[in-house]
Amino acid sequence: MKKNFFSLIFLLTTLSLGFTSCSEDETIPVLSAGFTTSANVVEAGEAIEFTNSSTSATEYAWDFGDDVTSKDQNPEHTYAADGKYTVTLVATNGEKTEQFQTKVYVGEYAYVLNYGGYNGTKSSITLYDKKTASVPVFDYYNLRNNTIMTSNAQSAYQYGNKIYFMGNNVDRITYVDAATFIQSNNGITDQVIKPRNCIAHDDILYVSCWGGEVWNDASISYILKIDTKTDAVIGKIMLAGGPEDLEIANGKLYAALNYDKKVAVIDMASEAITYIDMPGVCSYITKDPSENIFVSVVSSFSTPADQDGLAHINTQNDTYTMYPLSGISAAYVNVMAANTDFSKLYVMTSAYDSSWKLTGAVAVFDVASKAFESSNIVEGLFGINGIGVNNLNDDLNVFISPSTTESGQIKVYSKDGVEKKSIGVGIAPMMLFDIE
Amino acid sequence: MKKELLIIVFFVCVAFANGQIIDTVNVEEVVVTGTSISRFQAGSKIEKVPEQQFELMQGGNLDQLILRFTPFAIKSTAGSLATIRVRGTSPDHTSINFGGININSMTLGSSNLSNVPLYLFDEIGLQYGSASVVNGSGSIGGAIHLGMNNYWVNGFKAEARIDFGSFDEELYGTKLFYGNGKLEGVTRVYYYKKKNNFPFFNTTHDFEKNGAFGEDVQRNASVENKGVIQEFNYKLNTNETFTLKAWIESDWHEIQQNMQTNAFQPNMRKTLSDDHVRLWTEYKNEKKKLHYKLGGGYVYDNSVHNHSTNKISTQRLIFNGDGEYKITNSSSFKGGVNFKSIFPKVYAYNTDLKREDWTDIHLSYYQNFFNKLTVSVNLRQAFVTDFDVPFTPAVGFSYNALAKEKYVLSFTGNVSKSYRVPTFNDRYWVPGGNPNLKPEDGINYELGSKFSYCIDGLSGTIKVNAFYLDVDNWLLWINGSNGWEADNVQRVVSKGIEAQSNWDIHVQKYTINTGLNYSYNPVERAEVVGSSSGQNKAIGRQLEYVPLHRGVFYLSGIYKDLSAGFDFNYTHKQYTSQEQNTIPAYTLVNLQSSYKYKVNDDHVFRFAASLNNILNKDYQSSEGYPMPRINGRLSVTYKFK
């Protein structure tokens, strides 16, 4: 027993000496390789700056993946051709070397916001190659941040060098750097309750918020004003009726109300609110090139519409013309998408198929003649969750979400309605956005 | 791990060293809920939760008992919401029966097992596999029977119980029995609350720390439930009884926040309260060759989400008549009719929907040959207002292959059809409800063998069951033509093997009980049905929230008035979506000990202690919702007579 006891003491002493000697080694700086980029998604011809974060290195060897190399500490590189490139940095100190890699995407890209499931998977962002209609990165946010998003984002919006996400489970407005897609803080939470959509003007972000269970009490909703430079909440405009989408036109802020048959018009200087009475509740707004707006007037469960369809509001005098479209989608975002010259406005709706089953469809509003085309461009869709137009080639992208627990799809149609392709994206895709 | 095993061994040893014996439930007359239903269902797997396990879990709710000792899967948050998945089926595929009432909500189709307190009951019966032929709609995966015995007390006896547990858990309960041997009243009351503010490791990414949020405490997850069951039983004579049971339950809880909300929106608080009134009355006459039962019931369910004024309530009136005619000692006929009127009052339903009527007719026959082979046939047809329900037959057998003095070997087999009428929400919720849905229909094939062994000092059983369950027109809410809607979207096939073993070993004054309960259950989406484009992602893959393996091992020892034991249960990883999201496998080890102190024959105290999750593991049963690490409970029960 005694012998065992002494053996134990000896072992412990040996171990402690071992640890002591290790700690002496730790005083020598460890060689590591690392760098950050000014952007990871660029167009051909656009320069990327590489900032070295290696430690204890004396030499650097860069390989940009396009047969171009460099020995600079902080090089700059411009890719000539589209593609996915692996950038490798080898940091050297004497005979020791360390390596770090990252990927750079060169081409014309957009981003797909996938809502996820309200009580399940959080949102994700899919990188979308507009030229090939393909998905190089399924969850780009995760790739850049090494973690998942912390909320379900109702919408995404770029202002300056930030991409804002309106997270409503948990409630918070988060943002990533527009160039690097890196999130650097936990976001804005002050007075943020059920944010829906946003728009910015003069460095102020206006955020429509439901404020809680607006379906029980329509008076609790508001528009939050956030200073985009400091992230501080600088004001709150109480706006009953559950504001959904926002748009700024002719110097006025328009809010589609989802729990009142109205569009609110807010004078941005005085914050005085006037209302345009509508034949139904409203959800989504698209601005045309003449600064007038199209609003989706929908029939919701709690408030059936007297008439549903598209309302075109003249922002000079705030009067509107109604273009009826029975069964227009009551979804909240991306109900409409215009083609690049705004001659056509695609509208999510529903229609009976040949066997008299109601299915999702996309109607086409001809802007010049101000009439819906006689037939829908697409019909027979299940789980339609949003639409978007590829601004490179005017292809119609229809987002399909069969459920909140499985991946969605983008169905790509030519402007003639021919299905070109179907691409898998994240759970509940709803929105396509570009970053400038 | 070694250290943890040592703790277990030590705990067991200490218990024995004190030299006492376990308490056993003293039941004067057992009216097992399982017995009457099992006779006409030859080959079905119907079991009673062993008394020791039931006694141990008396301070908890049904979900805790099932998770700890049965192979059924439970998806739960930490104490406020738990749903069951029997043999890979949905929560609304298992009926939960109190008297002649299936307590599953008519709107949701399922029950919250956290709102079923074991303290109010005397036993729990578990039926594995389809049971629609006896329980009607919904019992595709199985059935649970909440059993209550008749004691026919002559005089007065009583019981009171107090539990204190971790995270401000408290239970107060009492049972009063009074009667003259012919007329008895039984009053069972409980009050349960729990603050549920347990610590856990929050894995949510914190961008300001550039890592996990870290150590956290669960907020806004408290529970407060209370209930009473009042019974009056009247024995007109030995073969004629009348019973009346009234269960009034009022449950309230804060809807537990998930990890992200707990980290970043700590003040978010939502509540759910549920009120239930369940009345069941039954007259039973077994005087002549024709035995018959007449029952009637009333159910009121009301649910209030976060103080909303939107009404979600239903009322039910139930009538049941059953007759059994014994042709000979080895053959019987049974027939019956069940009638139910449902009155929904739900804000999202069309106001024209005032009432729906369900009528079920069933016929059963069983025949025993030479005391060796029993065969049963069941037929059931339901009629529902404006809805077509499939005809549901079942046939089964049990065969005693070997019956010796020391052992018995038997084989069982059963084929049964089952169905579920879609819930009121599935059919009538606006928007999305679809009155044209088809009923879900299933067919269950079951084969089993049971080996029982008994010699001096050793008795036990080994059971092996294999099943194949095919459910067509499985219903889900999907994003359909223009928003969310209910649809029959898939066919699901669930297969499996269940192995069970339970042994009692008696050595001098020591009794050791040990056993194993294991289930291997591959459940797959076999195909997509209907025109939906969805639900085709994960065909051929294990269904969400169904572990492929689940197993429980338990060991306990009794010496005089002292008992101690431990149990170990393992739940395999589970998919949480049709993508690759999973929650990891987890292993829980629990310890318990109890001591019975007999003041005299009339006054008995029982002191019990349990330590749960002694490995102090962080785990999840529902994705994103933490479960408590090590936690404990102390209880004192006083019994008068």
Image (cartoon, rainbow, N blue to C red):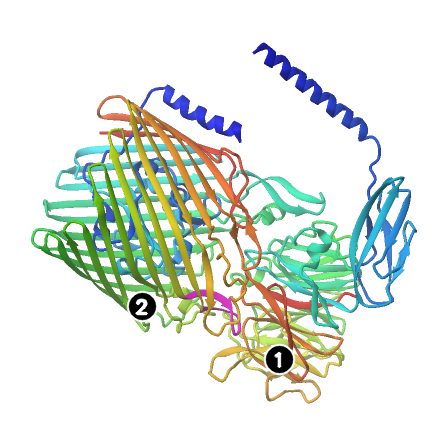
> Which residues fall within the magenta stretch?
B473-488
Q: How far is the residue under mark 1 from the one under mark 2?
A: 39 Å
Residue A89 falls inside the magenta stretch:
no
Q: Kindly identify which numbered label has been placed on residue B355.
A: 2
Q: Quadrant of the C terminus of chain B?
A: top left
Res. A237 in view? no
Compared with B550, B528 (above or below) is below
Of residues A436 and A219, which is closer to you in this image?
Answer: A436
Q: Is residue A274 left or right of residue B446?
A: right
The answer to whether one can see residue B195 in this image is: yes
Q: Position of residue A293 (x, y in %)?
A: 69, 77
Q: Quadrant of residue B55?
A: top left
Question: Between residues A297 and B479, which one lies in front from this camera angle?
Answer: B479
* Residue identified by numbered label 1: A310
From the top left corner, tell me how far across and down residue B124 is, in percent.
31, 45
Q: Please state the chain letter of the residue tagged with numbered disc 1 in the rendered image.
A: A
The majority secondary structure of the magenta stretch comes to strand
> Tag 2's secondary structure?
loop
Query: Tag 1's secondary structure?
Result: strand
Looking at this view, name the residue that lies furthest to the left.
Answer: B288
Residue B568 disc label? none
Mark 2 nearby-residue class (10 Å; few <14, some 14–19, many ≥20): some
Residue at 84% from the left image edge and 50% from the top image edge: A89
